[in-house]
Amino acid sequence: MFNWIKKAKTLFSSGVTTESGLVKINDDGFMSDDISVSIEDIVSEDDHEDIGKIFVLSLTEFHQALGETWDKREAKIFLLAESVLRQRIGVGNRWEHQSKEIYILIFPTLPELEGAARTYDIAEELGLKIIGERFDGSSRPLIRVAGVDPKDAIGPDGKLDIEKLEKAGRSGQSAGDSTNVAGQTKAGTTIIHEKDQAETITEADLSLDWKKNPHKHVDHDGDWIKNEHHSQEHDTDWQKNVRQTPRKVDPNWQEMNHPAPKKEKGPQWVSMKEDEPQKPAKPAPSTVEKKPSYGLTFAPCWDRASQSLTIYRAILTYGVPGEKLLEGNAAYVRHVSAEQRLKIDIWLLQKSARALFSLMEKEIITPVFIPVHSSSLRAKERASMLAMIQKFTPHLRESYFIIEIMDDGLWRDEDLQEAIDTLKPMVRNIAFTPSSDKHFDIPAVTSLDWIGLDLATLDEHSGITPDGLISLQKETQQHHAKSYLFGVSKRAEIADFLEMGTELISGKALVRTTDKLRPPFNLPEERLRA
């Protein structure tokens, strides 16, 4: 464990660099180019609205036409296919080689019709690369394209039905074939449901042929020189054909000289320069004050229990135009008094609740860690904070709110226990982030559901060693709580934290923050270790 650490006393902190995340967010879903999140994982989710159809690219007829020579040429054909797919698929879209016969493609970032058009472009380009200009989409061998609804592509076992996809590909429409084939819909994709017949759209409607045809017509002859004298015997303009005597050949011709008209001269204007010309005045400096603004973003968290990205952490942001955006703990620097921190804690709570409404209406459970300063749960501020929490419906509070108490090192054990006991019935969970000022000690309290750290808040003076993390993990287990680590910035740390037994992980090394809450995304642990 921790093999990547060069020195035993190296501290875990925010670090100076942040690697790109393993998981990517595109549009309304999670995607990944760095870990093997498959198309099967994506289409097996409940929500298929933003995925569109699965497009099948079938090389079956190439395979059959080549016969025994296929094995010799197979590797080259696959390399050509993968080269074209990488160049043409587009950012945020995915392809997979599922068998010797088919490639499957999805286009979450494109409307379905544009995804179909791009699939046809890819098929035509691949055909041209394999057999050159002889490929016209109508002479065999053909590359066929089909589209399948995601729900029809998944078998009873929850996995992709490859046989069904191969069958759909074999019966698909050939790339480049301009004839309208019966049983094709939406850019030539195969119909599996009869109810889709009403949505039939012909190839002519979509204009998918990416090759421009030359503008020729059998009745049109562009030779204008030949046509100039084509029907002179029918020319009724006889005066045009009368031969005129050139001017100077006529012996009686006299040249008339006309003097050029004289231009009248206007008065001569002379610039009288007495003083230096005045330079334009410099514009007055702008008096418009750059107003700072607060915002809210969410960090998706990987949850060991559900093996998915299903929990979020709310993060405060603070930005001034033209300056670096501050996130998390750094965004609270202007709020030093208990009253100021109470206001920003309430604002963050309200914004988080508003972001949850759309998922709550769909009955999608995505709990959110909501950071709250310790000072907002003590003295007179405590009553205001509890009153605000109680304003939300019990279903919202008890299903989604995880109140994260950010320790300031000033708690007495009995006061913290009282605050926990008061909060516990109102919300889903209580989390506690111990203070570095107290050497990350956990107070002698009970009923905590989560205990952990935000590595992004630590620096070289407040960091924690690997031994300190292991000790905190053991102490968390003694409190019968689950552990979390936020702000993970290095990919090498993820596998070590998993090995250590951390229950919840977030940070830019896993996935970047997002302004929008999304449905859970399945992500097995072994894919994080790869």
Image: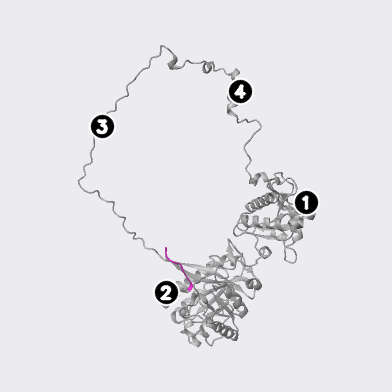
Dots 4 and 3: beta carbons under 8 Å?
no
Q: Secondary structure at mark 2?
A: loop
Q: Nearer the viewer, mark 4 or mark 2?
A: 4
Q: Position of residue 323 (x, y in %)?
A: 42, 65
Question: What residue is disc 4 on?
Answer: 230
Quarter of the image where the C terminus is located: bottom right
Question: What residue is disc 3 on?
Answer: 266
Of mark 4 and mark 3, the one earlier in the sequence is 4
Using the image, determine if residue 74 lies above or below residue 182: below
Q: Quadrant of residue 340?
A: bottom left
Dots 3 and 1: beta carbons under 8 Å?
no
Can residue 136 be seen here? The reply is no
In the picture provided, is 332 more to the left or to the right than 401?
left
Question: What residue is disc 2 on?
Answer: 335
Quarter of the image where the N terminus is located: bottom right
Of mark 3 and mark 1, the one earlier in the sequence is 1
Closer-to-camera residue (124/338): 124
| Category of crowding for the residue at label 3, using alpha-carbon neighbours closer than 10 angstroms: few (below 14), some (14–19), many (at least 20) | few
Judged from this view, the residue extending furthest toward the right is 68
Using the image, determine if residue 280 lies above or below residue 403: above
The segment highlighted magenta reads: 321-328
Q: Secondary structure at mark 3?
A: loop
| Category of crowding for the residue at label 2, using alpha-carbon neighbours closer than 10 angstroms: few (below 14), some (14–19), many (at least 20) | few
Which color scheme did the rendering employ for the protein?
one colour
Can residue 493 be seen here? The reply is yes
Judged from this view, the residue extending furthest toward the top is 252
How far is disc 3 from disc 1 in space, using C-alphas?
89 Å
Specify the label residue 101 is tagged with: none
Numbered disc total: 4
